[in-house]
Image (cartoon, helix red, strand yellow):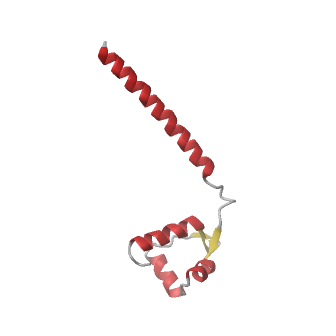
Amino acid sequence: MMLMNVLRDIFALLQEIYWLMKAMVKTQQHLQPSLIERKLWSKQEIMDKLGMSETTYKRHLKSNLLRPIRLGGTDLYFEEDIVQAMEESRRKGRI
């Protein structure tokens, strides 16, 4: 009898955790901006803002530090991808 009560309590807690996690995922989906709202940076903007040369840019492409979206031969980047690349560079001690 006592074991059944413990199992019921565990089941109730697992249900609560499930619903809380589901609510968190739903909230995070609403916080993420749509593709239209996200800032796109061109290759030239990245080079200007980060003060890098064409050679450095190509080196970062080759090392996969920069991963562009290529549309019609143009390299484009989402702002958060650039922030992630900078954090990776900082983590490796390059910045």
Q: Position of residue 40 (x, y in %)?
A: 64, 68
Q: Residue 79: percent from the left, percent from the top?
A: 59, 67
Residue at 46% over, 69% down: 87
61 displayed left or right of 33: left
- Image coordinates for residue 33, horizontal then vertical, percent: 64, 55
Q: Residue at x 34, y 21 (%)?
A: 6
Name which quarter of the figure residue 50 lies in. bottom right
User: Horizontally, is 22 left or right of 8 in the view?
Assistant: right
Q: Quadrant of the C terminus?
A: bottom left
The quadrant holding residue 43 is bottom right
Quarter of the image where the N terminus is located: top left
- On screen, 91 above or below 22? below
Marker count (numbered): 0
- Front residue of 71 and 45: 45
Depth check, front residue: 69 or 13:
13
In which image quadrant can residue 91 be found?
bottom left
In the image, residue 67 sits, relative to residue 22, either above or below, namely below
In the image as oriented, which residue stretches furthest toward the right?
36
- Residue 74: x and y in percent read 63, 75
Residue at horizontal 59 percent and vertical 48 percent from the top: 29
- 16 up-or-down from 39: above or below: above
Farthest residue to the top: give it. 1
Q: Is residue 60 left or right of residue 78?
A: left
